[in-house]
Amino acid sequence: MSDPRPRLGVPVDEWETDVLVIGGGLAGLVAARVAGTAGARVTVLAKGFAGADGVSPFAGGVALCLFPEDDLDAFLDEHEWACEGLVHREAVTRVAAISGRLWEWLAAQGVPVEREPLGTLRRRWLRVGGRSRVPRLALESVSFMRHLRRCALAAGARILDHGVVTELLTGEDGGVAGAVGFRYQEGRLFRIRARAVVLAAGGCAWRGAHMGVHSAMGEGYGLAARAGAELASMEYCTSYIATCSLFDSHGQDVLAALGGRFRNRLGENILERHGEPDPAPPQRLTLAMLTEWLEGRGPVVFDLRAIPAERRRQWERDFPLVARALARTGVDVFAQPVPWIPGFTGSIAGSGGVRTLDLAGRTTVPGLFAVGDTACRTPVVGAGSGLTYLNLSWALASGYWAGAAAAELAREGLPAPTEPAVEAEAWNRALAPLGREGGTRPVDVLRRLQRLVVDPERNFFRSAAGLKSSLRDLEGVWDDVCRLAAADWHDLVRCHEVEHATLTALAMFSSALVRQETRGWHRRLDFPRRDDTHWRRWTVARLEPCGERPAFRVHTIALEDPAAFDARLPAAEVGVLP
Protein backbone atom coordinates (compact mmCIF):
# COMPACT_ATOMS: atom_id res chain seq x y z
CA MET A 1 0.00 0.00 0.00
CA SER A 2 1.07 3.61 -0.44
CA ASP A 3 2.51 5.36 2.61
CA PRO A 4 0.87 8.80 2.99
CA ARG A 5 3.61 10.12 5.26
CA PRO A 6 6.19 12.30 3.53
CA ARG A 7 9.69 10.83 3.81
CA LEU A 8 12.63 12.57 2.21
CA GLY A 9 10.17 14.27 -0.11
CA VAL A 10 9.66 11.05 -2.10
CA PRO A 11 6.56 8.80 -1.91
CA VAL A 12 7.06 5.41 -0.28
CA ASP A 13 5.38 2.06 -0.93
CA GLU A 14 5.41 -0.66 1.72
CA TRP A 15 4.63 -4.34 1.26
CA GLU A 16 4.76 -7.49 3.35
CA THR A 17 5.52 -10.90 1.87
CA ASP A 18 6.65 -14.31 3.05
CA VAL A 19 9.34 -14.75 0.40
CA LEU A 20 11.04 -11.91 -1.46
CA VAL A 21 12.85 -12.95 -4.65
CA ILE A 22 15.32 -10.35 -5.94
CA GLY A 23 15.83 -11.00 -9.64
CA GLY A 24 13.58 -12.08 -12.50
CA GLY A 25 15.72 -14.62 -14.36
CA LEU A 26 15.40 -18.39 -14.52
CA ALA A 27 16.48 -19.17 -10.94
CA GLY A 28 14.36 -16.39 -9.44
CA LEU A 29 11.18 -17.26 -11.32
CA VAL A 30 11.55 -20.96 -10.53
CA ALA A 31 12.04 -20.12 -6.85
CA ALA A 32 8.92 -17.96 -6.99
CA ARG A 33 6.92 -20.71 -8.69
CA VAL A 34 7.96 -23.34 -6.13
CA ALA A 35 7.48 -21.11 -3.08
CA GLY A 36 4.09 -19.98 -4.33
CA THR A 37 3.02 -23.56 -5.02
CA ALA A 38 3.92 -24.35 -1.39
CA GLY A 39 1.47 -21.70 -0.18
CA ALA A 40 3.86 -18.83 0.53
CA ARG A 41 3.12 -15.23 -0.36
CA VAL A 42 5.82 -14.38 -2.90
CA THR A 43 7.05 -11.07 -4.29
CA VAL A 44 9.49 -10.94 -7.22
CA LEU A 45 11.44 -7.73 -7.67
CA ALA A 46 13.21 -7.40 -11.04
CA LYS A 47 15.61 -4.65 -12.07
CA GLY A 48 14.25 -4.90 -15.59
CA PHE A 49 11.28 -6.96 -16.74
CA ALA A 50 10.99 -10.33 -15.03
CA GLY A 51 11.31 -13.02 -17.69
CA ALA A 52 13.53 -10.84 -19.85
CA ASP A 53 16.07 -10.01 -17.14
CA GLY A 54 19.69 -11.10 -17.17
CA VAL A 55 21.36 -13.78 -19.24
CA SER A 56 18.65 -16.47 -19.22
CA PRO A 57 16.83 -15.30 -22.39
CA PHE A 58 20.11 -15.58 -24.30
CA ALA A 59 20.93 -19.15 -23.28
CA GLY A 60 19.75 -20.80 -26.49
CA GLY A 61 18.82 -24.13 -24.96
CA VAL A 62 22.35 -25.07 -23.89
CA ALA A 63 21.03 -26.87 -20.82
CA LEU A 64 22.24 -30.15 -19.39
CA CYS A 65 19.47 -32.74 -19.32
CA LEU A 66 20.47 -36.18 -18.02
CA PHE A 67 18.10 -39.14 -17.82
CA PRO A 68 18.48 -42.08 -15.39
CA GLU A 69 19.74 -44.34 -18.19
CA ASP A 70 22.64 -41.99 -19.02
CA ASP A 71 26.17 -42.71 -17.80
CA LEU A 72 26.39 -40.26 -14.88
CA ASP A 73 29.85 -41.40 -13.74
CA ALA A 74 31.34 -40.83 -17.19
CA PHE A 75 29.82 -37.36 -17.28
CA LEU A 76 31.22 -36.53 -13.82
CA ASP A 77 34.73 -37.73 -14.68
CA GLU A 78 34.86 -35.64 -17.83
CA HIS A 79 33.27 -32.67 -16.09
CA GLU A 80 35.85 -32.63 -13.29
CA TRP A 81 38.67 -32.77 -15.84
CA ALA A 82 37.27 -29.85 -17.86
CA CYS A 83 36.69 -27.76 -14.72
CA GLU A 84 40.25 -28.38 -13.44
CA GLY A 85 39.19 -29.51 -10.01
CA LEU A 86 37.59 -27.73 -7.03
CA VAL A 87 34.18 -29.29 -7.74
CA HIS A 88 32.23 -30.98 -4.98
CA ARG A 89 31.48 -34.27 -6.69
CA GLU A 90 28.38 -35.01 -4.62
CA ALA A 91 26.94 -31.55 -5.36
CA VAL A 92 27.47 -32.00 -9.11
CA THR A 93 25.88 -35.44 -8.87
CA ARG A 94 22.76 -33.97 -7.24
CA VAL A 95 22.37 -31.24 -9.85
CA ALA A 96 23.02 -33.53 -12.81
CA ALA A 97 20.78 -36.30 -11.49
CA ILE A 98 17.79 -34.01 -10.93
CA SER A 99 18.19 -32.07 -14.19
CA GLY A 100 16.05 -34.36 -16.35
CA ARG A 101 13.28 -34.54 -13.74
CA LEU A 102 13.16 -30.76 -13.38
CA TRP A 103 12.98 -30.16 -17.12
CA GLU A 104 10.16 -32.72 -17.32
CA TRP A 105 8.42 -30.89 -14.48
CA LEU A 106 8.59 -27.60 -16.37
CA ALA A 107 7.48 -29.23 -19.61
CA ALA A 108 4.44 -30.64 -17.82
CA GLN A 109 3.49 -27.05 -16.91
CA GLY A 110 3.48 -26.04 -20.54
CA VAL A 111 7.00 -24.67 -20.91
CA PRO A 112 7.77 -24.83 -24.65
CA VAL A 113 10.30 -27.62 -25.24
CA GLU A 114 10.72 -29.95 -28.18
CA ARG A 115 9.69 -33.60 -27.83
CA GLU A 116 10.46 -36.81 -29.66
CA PRO A 117 7.65 -38.64 -31.51
CA LEU A 118 7.17 -40.92 -28.47
CA GLY A 119 6.79 -37.95 -26.13
CA THR A 120 10.18 -37.81 -24.40
CA LEU A 121 12.15 -34.57 -24.25
CA ARG A 122 14.23 -34.03 -27.36
CA ARG A 123 17.91 -33.78 -26.60
CA ARG A 124 20.88 -33.06 -28.83
CA TRP A 125 24.19 -34.76 -28.19
CA LEU A 126 27.08 -32.44 -28.95
CA ARG A 127 30.74 -32.08 -28.14
CA VAL A 128 30.44 -28.82 -26.20
CA GLY A 129 33.18 -27.01 -24.30
CA GLY A 130 35.70 -29.86 -24.39
CA ARG A 131 33.21 -32.52 -23.34
CA SER A 132 32.79 -35.51 -25.61
CA ARG A 133 29.00 -35.76 -25.48
CA VAL A 134 26.70 -33.38 -23.62
CA PRO A 135 22.97 -34.12 -23.74
CA ARG A 136 21.43 -30.69 -24.04
CA LEU A 137 17.77 -29.81 -24.06
CA ALA A 138 16.16 -28.47 -27.20
CA LEU A 139 14.36 -25.26 -26.22
CA GLU A 140 14.05 -21.68 -27.39
CA SER A 141 15.02 -19.63 -24.37
CA VAL A 142 13.15 -16.38 -25.11
CA SER A 143 9.74 -18.11 -25.23
CA PHE A 144 10.82 -20.31 -22.33
CA MET A 145 11.48 -17.31 -20.08
CA ARG A 146 8.20 -15.63 -21.01
CA HIS A 147 6.40 -18.79 -19.98
CA LEU A 148 8.29 -18.94 -16.67
CA ARG A 149 6.97 -15.47 -15.84
CA ARG A 150 3.45 -16.73 -16.43
CA CYS A 151 4.18 -19.75 -14.24
CA ALA A 152 5.26 -17.52 -11.35
CA LEU A 153 2.14 -15.38 -11.71
CA ALA A 154 -0.04 -18.50 -11.81
CA ALA A 155 1.47 -19.55 -8.48
CA GLY A 156 0.28 -16.28 -6.97
CA ALA A 157 3.54 -14.30 -7.08
CA ARG A 158 3.40 -10.51 -7.15
CA ILE A 159 5.91 -9.21 -9.72
CA LEU A 160 7.36 -5.73 -9.35
CA ASP A 161 9.30 -4.77 -12.46
CA HIS A 162 11.85 -1.95 -12.76
CA GLY A 163 12.86 -1.95 -9.12
CA VAL A 164 16.32 -1.63 -7.56
CA VAL A 165 17.14 -3.00 -4.11
CA THR A 166 19.73 -0.78 -2.46
CA GLU A 167 20.02 -2.53 0.94
CA LEU A 168 18.85 -5.63 2.72
CA LEU A 169 17.26 -5.07 6.12
CA THR A 170 18.42 -7.23 9.02
CA GLY A 171 16.95 -7.78 12.46
CA GLU A 172 18.54 -7.71 15.89
CA ASP A 173 19.42 -11.42 15.52
CA GLY A 174 21.37 -10.71 12.32
CA GLY A 175 18.78 -12.46 10.17
CA VAL A 176 17.33 -10.90 7.05
CA ALA A 177 14.11 -8.93 7.52
CA GLY A 178 13.40 -7.52 4.06
CA ALA A 179 14.75 -4.91 1.68
CA VAL A 180 14.54 -1.24 0.72
CA GLY A 181 15.07 0.44 -2.63
CA PHE A 182 13.31 2.39 -5.37
CA ARG A 183 11.33 1.93 -8.58
CA TYR A 184 12.97 4.13 -11.15
CA GLN A 185 10.16 4.43 -13.69
CA GLU A 186 7.76 5.69 -11.04
CA GLY A 187 10.21 7.66 -8.88
CA ARG A 188 9.09 5.97 -5.67
CA LEU A 189 10.86 4.35 -2.73
CA PHE A 190 9.81 1.01 -1.28
CA ARG A 191 10.24 -1.15 1.79
CA ILE A 192 9.39 -4.85 1.68
CA ARG A 193 9.21 -6.92 4.88
CA ALA A 194 9.95 -10.61 4.32
CA ARG A 195 10.71 -13.72 6.32
CA ALA A 196 13.00 -15.10 3.60
CA VAL A 197 14.92 -13.37 0.81
CA VAL A 198 16.17 -15.23 -2.27
CA LEU A 199 18.99 -13.43 -4.09
CA ALA A 200 18.63 -14.21 -7.78
CA ALA A 201 20.10 -10.97 -9.13
CA GLY A 202 22.65 -12.54 -11.48
CA GLY A 203 26.42 -12.20 -11.46
CA CYS A 204 28.78 -9.39 -12.42
CA ALA A 205 30.16 -8.68 -15.89
CA TRP A 206 31.03 -4.98 -15.50
CA ARG A 207 29.19 -4.25 -18.78
CA GLY A 208 31.36 -6.78 -20.59
CA ALA A 209 31.33 -7.38 -24.34
CA HIS A 210 29.01 -10.36 -24.53
CA MET A 211 25.32 -10.47 -25.35
CA GLY A 212 23.02 -10.68 -22.34
CA VAL A 213 25.49 -9.74 -19.61
CA HIS A 214 25.13 -5.94 -19.70
CA SER A 215 22.73 -5.76 -16.77
CA ALA A 216 24.80 -8.07 -14.54
CA MET A 217 26.58 -5.63 -12.23
CA GLY A 218 27.13 -7.54 -9.00
CA GLU A 219 24.10 -6.28 -7.07
CA GLY A 220 23.55 -9.66 -5.41
CA TYR A 221 27.16 -9.82 -4.26
CA GLY A 222 27.15 -6.29 -2.86
CA LEU A 223 23.80 -6.67 -1.08
CA ALA A 224 24.85 -9.96 0.50
CA ALA A 225 28.27 -8.73 1.61
CA ARG A 226 26.84 -5.61 3.23
CA ALA A 227 24.25 -7.71 5.07
CA GLY A 228 27.07 -9.80 6.56
CA ALA A 229 27.08 -12.77 4.19
CA GLU A 230 30.30 -14.33 2.94
CA LEU A 231 31.41 -14.49 -0.68
CA ALA A 232 33.37 -17.44 -2.07
CA SER A 233 35.77 -18.16 -4.95
CA MET A 234 35.67 -14.54 -6.05
CA GLU A 235 38.98 -14.95 -7.87
CA TYR A 236 36.87 -16.85 -10.41
CA CYS A 237 34.81 -13.77 -11.28
CA THR A 238 36.96 -13.29 -14.35
CA SER A 239 36.13 -15.02 -17.64
CA TYR A 240 36.31 -14.33 -21.35
CA ILE A 241 34.10 -16.07 -23.91
CA ALA A 242 34.77 -15.98 -27.65
CA THR A 243 32.48 -13.38 -29.21
CA CYS A 244 32.04 -12.03 -32.72
CA SER A 245 33.87 -8.76 -33.36
CA LEU A 246 30.90 -7.44 -35.36
CA PHE A 247 28.67 -7.25 -32.28
CA ASP A 248 28.20 -8.78 -28.82
CA SER A 249 27.24 -12.41 -29.41
CA HIS A 250 26.93 -15.82 -27.85
CA GLY A 251 26.37 -19.41 -28.97
CA GLN A 252 29.92 -20.04 -30.20
CA ASP A 253 30.30 -23.23 -28.16
CA VAL A 254 27.52 -24.88 -30.12
CA LEU A 255 28.97 -23.56 -33.39
CA ALA A 256 32.32 -25.10 -32.44
CA ALA A 257 30.59 -28.39 -31.70
CA LEU A 258 28.94 -28.24 -35.13
CA GLY A 259 32.28 -27.83 -36.92
CA GLY A 260 33.44 -24.24 -36.44
CA ARG A 261 37.20 -23.80 -36.03
CA PHE A 262 39.25 -20.91 -34.64
CA ARG A 263 42.18 -20.03 -36.91
CA ASN A 264 45.00 -17.50 -36.68
CA ARG A 265 46.09 -15.25 -39.54
CA LEU A 266 48.23 -18.10 -40.90
CA GLY A 267 45.16 -20.30 -41.22
CA GLU A 268 46.26 -22.62 -38.42
CA ASN A 269 43.76 -24.22 -36.05
CA ILE A 270 44.81 -22.47 -32.83
CA LEU A 271 43.58 -25.26 -30.54
CA GLU A 272 45.59 -27.87 -32.43
CA ARG A 273 48.59 -25.56 -32.27
CA HIS A 274 48.32 -25.38 -28.47
CA GLY A 275 47.64 -29.09 -27.98
CA GLU A 276 44.05 -28.59 -26.83
CA PRO A 277 40.97 -30.63 -27.68
CA ASP A 278 38.69 -29.08 -30.27
CA PRO A 279 36.31 -27.79 -28.97
CA ALA A 280 38.18 -26.89 -25.78
CA PRO A 281 36.99 -25.79 -22.33
CA PRO A 282 36.30 -22.02 -22.47
CA GLN A 283 39.22 -21.03 -20.23
CA ARG A 284 41.67 -22.90 -22.48
CA LEU A 285 40.22 -21.41 -25.67
CA THR A 286 40.63 -17.94 -24.16
CA LEU A 287 44.27 -18.62 -23.31
CA ALA A 288 44.91 -19.84 -26.86
CA MET A 289 43.25 -16.77 -28.41
CA LEU A 290 45.15 -14.31 -26.22
CA THR A 291 48.45 -16.11 -26.82
CA GLU A 292 47.97 -15.89 -30.59
CA TRP A 293 47.44 -12.14 -30.34
CA LEU A 294 50.38 -11.61 -27.98
CA GLU A 295 52.72 -13.64 -30.19
CA GLY A 296 51.74 -11.75 -33.35
CA ARG A 297 49.53 -14.32 -35.09
CA GLY A 298 46.26 -12.42 -34.73
CA PRO A 299 43.60 -11.75 -35.65
CA VAL A 300 41.80 -14.97 -34.78
CA VAL A 301 38.86 -15.78 -37.03
CA PHE A 302 36.03 -18.28 -36.54
CA ASP A 303 35.78 -20.46 -39.65
CA LEU A 304 32.19 -21.75 -39.93
CA ARG A 305 32.30 -22.89 -43.56
CA ALA A 306 32.30 -26.60 -42.66
CA ILE A 307 28.95 -26.43 -40.85
CA PRO A 308 26.18 -28.14 -42.87
CA ALA A 309 23.21 -25.99 -43.92
CA GLU A 310 20.65 -27.91 -41.83
CA ARG A 311 22.76 -27.61 -38.70
CA ARG A 312 23.14 -23.90 -39.38
CA ARG A 313 19.35 -23.52 -39.58
CA GLN A 314 18.95 -25.43 -36.31
CA TRP A 315 21.47 -23.12 -34.61
CA GLU A 316 19.58 -20.10 -35.89
CA ARG A 317 16.39 -21.49 -34.37
CA ASP A 318 18.15 -22.11 -31.04
CA PHE A 319 19.78 -18.66 -30.95
CA PRO A 320 17.25 -16.35 -32.64
CA LEU A 321 18.56 -13.12 -31.09
CA VAL A 322 22.10 -13.72 -32.37
CA ALA A 323 20.85 -14.92 -35.76
CA ARG A 324 18.82 -11.73 -36.25
CA ALA A 325 21.78 -9.57 -35.22
CA LEU A 326 24.04 -11.40 -37.65
CA ALA A 327 21.56 -10.86 -40.45
CA ARG A 328 21.56 -7.11 -39.79
CA THR A 329 25.34 -6.89 -40.27
CA GLY A 330 25.00 -7.85 -43.92
CA VAL A 331 27.91 -10.29 -43.54
CA ASP A 332 27.36 -14.02 -43.95
CA VAL A 333 29.74 -15.25 -41.27
CA PHE A 334 29.05 -18.85 -42.28
CA ALA A 335 30.63 -18.15 -45.68
CA GLN A 336 33.15 -15.47 -44.73
CA PRO A 337 35.28 -16.00 -41.58
CA VAL A 338 35.41 -12.84 -39.47
CA PRO A 339 37.55 -11.98 -36.43
CA TRP A 340 36.38 -13.10 -33.01
CA ILE A 341 37.69 -11.78 -29.72
CA PRO A 342 37.69 -12.93 -26.08
CA GLY A 343 34.58 -11.11 -24.83
CA PHE A 344 34.71 -10.36 -21.11
CA THR A 345 31.90 -11.99 -19.09
CA GLY A 346 33.16 -11.61 -15.52
CA SER A 347 31.54 -14.08 -13.15
CA ILE A 348 28.95 -15.27 -15.70
CA ALA A 349 31.25 -17.86 -17.25
CA GLY A 350 33.23 -18.14 -14.01
CA SER A 351 32.08 -19.47 -10.66
CA GLY A 352 32.52 -16.89 -7.87
CA GLY A 353 29.56 -15.57 -5.88
CA VAL A 354 27.72 -15.53 -2.59
CA ARG A 355 28.84 -18.42 -0.41
CA THR A 356 26.07 -20.97 0.11
CA LEU A 357 26.24 -23.62 2.79
CA ASP A 358 24.08 -26.24 1.10
CA LEU A 359 22.09 -27.08 -2.01
CA ALA A 360 19.11 -25.09 -0.70
CA GLY A 361 21.20 -21.93 -1.10
CA ARG A 362 21.36 -20.94 2.57
CA THR A 363 23.99 -18.30 3.24
CA THR A 364 25.77 -17.28 6.43
CA VAL A 365 22.93 -14.79 7.11
CA PRO A 366 19.79 -16.49 8.49
CA GLY A 367 16.85 -16.25 6.10
CA LEU A 368 19.01 -15.21 3.12
CA PHE A 369 19.34 -17.59 0.14
CA ALA A 370 21.38 -17.27 -3.05
CA VAL A 371 20.67 -19.03 -6.35
CA GLY A 372 21.74 -19.12 -9.99
CA ASP A 373 24.59 -16.82 -11.00
CA THR A 374 24.37 -14.96 -7.68
CA ALA A 375 25.43 -18.07 -5.76
CA CYS A 376 29.00 -19.32 -5.79
CA ARG A 377 29.02 -22.12 -8.38
CA THR A 378 32.45 -23.55 -7.58
CA PRO A 379 30.90 -26.64 -5.95
CA VAL A 380 29.36 -27.54 -9.32
CA VAL A 381 31.67 -26.01 -11.96
CA GLY A 382 34.98 -25.83 -10.08
CA ALA A 383 37.64 -23.56 -11.55
CA GLY A 384 36.12 -23.69 -15.03
CA SER A 385 32.82 -22.74 -16.60
CA GLY A 386 29.29 -24.10 -16.72
CA LEU A 387 28.17 -21.54 -19.29
CA THR A 388 28.06 -23.99 -22.16
CA TYR A 389 25.82 -26.60 -20.58
CA LEU A 390 25.42 -26.60 -16.77
CA ASN A 391 24.53 -23.04 -15.74
CA LEU A 392 20.89 -23.27 -16.81
CA SER A 393 20.39 -26.58 -15.05
CA TRP A 394 22.13 -25.19 -11.96
CA ALA A 395 19.84 -22.14 -12.03
CA LEU A 396 16.82 -24.43 -12.31
CA ALA A 397 17.91 -26.80 -9.51
CA SER A 398 19.12 -24.08 -7.13
CA GLY A 399 15.95 -22.04 -7.66
CA TYR A 400 13.81 -25.11 -7.03
CA TRP A 401 15.60 -26.08 -3.81
CA ALA A 402 15.79 -22.51 -2.47
CA GLY A 403 12.14 -21.82 -3.25
CA ALA A 404 11.12 -24.88 -1.26
CA ALA A 405 13.40 -24.02 1.67
CA ALA A 406 12.32 -20.37 1.73
CA ALA A 407 8.65 -21.36 1.78
CA GLU A 408 9.34 -23.72 4.68
CA LEU A 409 11.10 -20.97 6.62
CA ALA A 410 8.29 -18.49 5.90
CA ARG A 411 5.88 -20.62 7.94
CA GLU A 412 7.56 -19.14 11.03
CA GLY A 413 5.91 -15.80 10.27
CA LEU A 414 7.29 -12.35 9.53
CA PRO A 415 10.29 -11.05 11.47
CA ALA A 416 9.97 -8.09 13.82
CA PRO A 417 9.74 -4.74 12.01
CA THR A 418 12.96 -2.79 11.63
CA GLU A 419 13.21 0.62 13.25
CA PRO A 420 11.80 3.46 11.09
CA ALA A 421 15.03 5.39 11.64
CA VAL A 422 17.03 2.50 10.14
CA GLU A 423 14.82 2.47 7.06
CA ALA A 424 15.02 6.27 6.71
CA GLU A 425 18.83 6.14 6.85
CA ALA A 426 18.83 3.43 4.18
CA TRP A 427 16.61 5.52 1.94
CA ASN A 428 18.84 8.56 2.52
CA ARG A 429 21.83 6.52 1.35
CA ALA A 430 19.89 5.28 -1.66
CA LEU A 431 18.96 8.78 -2.76
CA ALA A 432 22.26 10.48 -1.88
CA PRO A 433 23.55 10.76 -5.49
CA LEU A 434 20.26 12.20 -6.77
CA GLY A 435 20.76 15.88 -7.51
CA ARG A 436 24.28 15.98 -6.04
CA GLU A 437 26.17 18.86 -7.62
CA GLY A 438 29.75 18.61 -8.78
CA GLY A 439 29.89 14.84 -8.33
CA THR A 440 31.32 12.14 -10.58
CA ARG A 441 29.27 10.58 -13.38
CA PRO A 442 28.61 6.84 -13.11
CA VAL A 443 29.67 6.27 -16.72
CA ASP A 444 33.10 7.79 -16.00
CA VAL A 445 33.60 5.68 -12.88
CA LEU A 446 32.55 2.54 -14.75
CA ARG A 447 35.09 3.19 -17.50
CA ARG A 448 37.81 3.58 -14.90
CA LEU A 449 36.68 0.34 -13.27
CA GLN A 450 36.58 -1.50 -16.60
CA ARG A 451 40.21 -0.62 -17.28
CA LEU A 452 41.07 -2.64 -14.18
CA VAL A 453 38.82 -5.67 -14.58
CA VAL A 454 38.44 -6.15 -18.36
CA ASP A 455 42.06 -5.74 -19.45
CA PRO A 456 43.44 -9.30 -19.68
CA GLU A 457 46.95 -8.09 -18.91
CA ARG A 458 45.67 -7.10 -15.47
CA ASN A 459 42.92 -9.64 -14.82
CA PHE A 460 43.74 -12.75 -16.86
CA PHE A 461 47.55 -12.78 -16.57
CA ARG A 462 47.77 -12.02 -12.85
CA SER A 463 50.67 -11.54 -10.45
CA ALA A 464 51.06 -10.34 -6.88
CA ALA A 465 52.47 -7.02 -8.06
CA GLY A 466 49.66 -6.51 -10.57
CA LEU A 467 46.92 -7.46 -8.10
CA LYS A 468 48.30 -5.12 -5.45
CA SER A 469 48.44 -2.35 -8.04
CA SER A 470 44.80 -2.99 -8.97
CA LEU A 471 43.76 -2.90 -5.32
CA ARG A 472 45.51 0.46 -4.89
CA ASP A 473 43.76 1.80 -7.99
CA LEU A 474 40.43 0.61 -6.61
CA GLU A 475 40.92 2.94 -3.65
CA GLY A 476 40.69 5.86 -6.03
CA VAL A 477 37.69 4.32 -7.78
CA TRP A 478 35.92 3.99 -4.43
CA ASP A 479 36.59 7.66 -3.68
CA ASP A 480 34.80 8.45 -6.95
CA VAL A 481 31.94 6.11 -5.98
CA CYS A 482 31.42 8.14 -2.81
CA ARG A 483 31.00 11.27 -4.95
CA LEU A 484 28.63 9.78 -7.55
CA ALA A 485 25.95 12.13 -8.86
CA ALA A 486 22.69 11.13 -10.55
CA ALA A 487 20.83 13.44 -12.91
CA ASP A 488 17.60 11.43 -12.70
CA TRP A 489 16.17 8.12 -11.45
CA HIS A 490 17.65 6.12 -14.33
CA ASP A 491 21.05 7.62 -13.60
CA LEU A 492 20.53 6.63 -9.95
CA VAL A 493 20.24 2.99 -11.08
CA ARG A 494 23.66 3.29 -12.72
CA CYS A 495 25.15 4.82 -9.58
CA HIS A 496 24.12 1.82 -7.49
CA GLU A 497 25.27 -0.60 -10.20
CA VAL A 498 28.74 0.97 -10.21
CA GLU A 499 28.91 0.84 -6.41
CA HIS A 500 28.12 -2.90 -6.33
CA ALA A 501 30.47 -3.58 -9.24
CA THR A 502 33.30 -1.82 -7.39
CA LEU A 503 32.72 -3.94 -4.28
CA THR A 504 32.74 -7.04 -6.49
CA ALA A 505 36.06 -6.04 -8.04
CA LEU A 506 37.51 -5.49 -4.58
CA ALA A 507 36.46 -8.98 -3.47
CA MET A 508 37.78 -10.49 -6.71
CA PHE A 509 41.27 -8.97 -6.57
CA SER A 510 41.55 -9.61 -2.82
CA SER A 511 40.72 -13.30 -3.30
CA ALA A 512 42.99 -13.63 -6.34
CA LEU A 513 45.92 -12.36 -4.27
CA VAL A 514 45.36 -15.17 -1.75
CA ARG A 515 45.18 -18.10 -4.23
CA GLN A 516 48.81 -18.85 -5.03
CA GLU A 517 48.48 -21.20 -7.98
CA THR A 518 47.19 -21.32 -11.56
CA ARG A 519 43.93 -23.18 -12.08
CA GLY A 520 41.07 -22.65 -14.53
CA TRP A 521 40.20 -19.00 -15.02
CA HIS A 522 42.66 -17.94 -12.30
CA ARG A 523 46.17 -17.56 -13.73
CA ARG A 524 49.15 -16.39 -11.68
CA LEU A 525 52.34 -15.64 -13.61
CA ASP A 526 54.24 -15.90 -10.32
CA PHE A 527 52.60 -19.26 -9.47
CA PRO A 528 52.22 -20.80 -12.96
CA ARG A 529 51.28 -24.37 -11.95
CA ARG A 530 48.25 -26.06 -10.50
CA ASP A 531 48.90 -27.11 -6.89
CA ASP A 532 46.61 -29.89 -5.69
CA THR A 533 48.76 -30.42 -2.61
CA HIS A 534 47.99 -27.04 -1.03
CA TRP A 535 45.10 -25.58 -3.02
CA ARG A 536 42.23 -28.04 -3.02
CA ARG A 537 40.56 -25.22 -1.14
CA TRP A 538 37.97 -22.52 -1.71
CA THR A 539 38.56 -18.89 -0.81
CA VAL A 540 36.02 -17.14 1.44
CA ALA A 541 35.77 -13.34 1.60
CA ARG A 542 33.98 -11.28 4.25
CA LEU A 543 33.47 -7.52 4.12
CA GLU A 544 35.23 -5.89 7.04
CA PRO A 545 33.39 -3.39 9.29
CA CYS A 546 33.21 -0.10 7.46
CA GLY A 547 36.23 2.13 7.70
CA GLU A 548 37.21 4.93 5.37
CA ARG A 549 37.11 2.45 2.50
CA PRO A 550 35.68 -1.09 2.27
CA ALA A 551 38.03 -4.07 2.54
CA PHE A 552 37.57 -7.83 2.37
CA ARG A 553 39.22 -10.29 4.72
CA VAL A 554 39.93 -13.54 2.86
CA HIS A 555 40.53 -16.99 4.29
CA THR A 556 40.31 -20.49 2.80
CA ILE A 557 38.46 -23.70 3.57
CA ALA A 558 39.38 -27.20 2.42
CA LEU A 559 36.95 -29.00 0.11
CA GLU A 560 37.08 -31.99 2.45
CA ASP A 561 36.02 -29.91 5.45
CA PRO A 562 32.42 -30.88 6.37
CA ALA A 563 31.69 -27.18 6.96
CA ALA A 564 32.62 -26.30 3.37
CA PHE A 565 29.38 -27.47 1.77
CA ASP A 566 26.47 -29.75 2.63
CA ALA A 567 25.55 -31.62 -0.56
CA ARG A 568 22.76 -33.69 0.94
CA LEU A 569 19.36 -33.25 -0.68
CA PRO A 570 17.49 -30.42 1.07
CA ALA A 571 14.89 -31.57 3.58
CA ALA A 572 12.37 -28.97 2.43
CA GLU A 573 10.82 -30.26 -0.78
CA VAL A 574 7.59 -29.55 -2.58
CA GLY A 575 5.74 -32.51 -4.01
CA VAL A 576 5.63 -31.19 -7.55
CA LEU A 577 8.25 -33.30 -9.28
CA PRO A 578 7.05 -36.23 -11.38
Image (tube, rainbow, N blue to C red):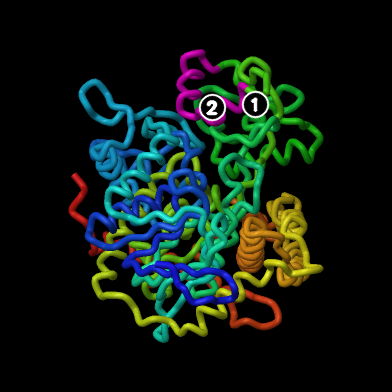
Q: Are marks 2 and 1 in contact (CB under 8 Å)?
A: yes
Figure check: 539 above or below 313? below
Label placed on residue 411: none
What residue did someone put label 1 on? 302
Please, what is the three-letter code of the amino acid marked with disc 2? Answer: Leu
**Whole-percent x and y of residue 517?**
62, 60
Label placed on residue 255: 2
Picture quarter with the N terminus: bottom left
Identify the secondary structure beneath mark 1. strand
Q: Magenta region's main secondary structure?
A: helix
Identify the secondary structure beneath mark 2. helix
Relative horizontal placement of residue 164, taking residue 62 as reference (left or right):
right
Residue 323: within the magenta?
Answer: yes
Figure check: 329 above or below 470? above
The residues bearing labels 2 and 1 have C-alpha atoms spaced at a distance of 9 Å
**Residue at point 37% right, 60% down?**
43
**Residue at point 27% right, 24% down?**
116
**Whole-percent x and y of residue 245?**
70, 32
Picture quarter with the C terminus: top left
Categorize mark 2 by other alpha carbons within 10 Å: few (<14), some (14-19), many (20+): many
Q: Quadrant of residue 552?
A: bottom right
Please, what is the three-letter code of the amino acid marked with disc 1? Answer: Phe
**Whole-percent x and y of residue 572?**
24, 63
Categorize mark 1 by other alpha carbons within 10 Å: few (<14), some (14-19), many (20+): many
Q: Quadrant of residue 329?
A: top right
> Which region is colored magenta?
307-327
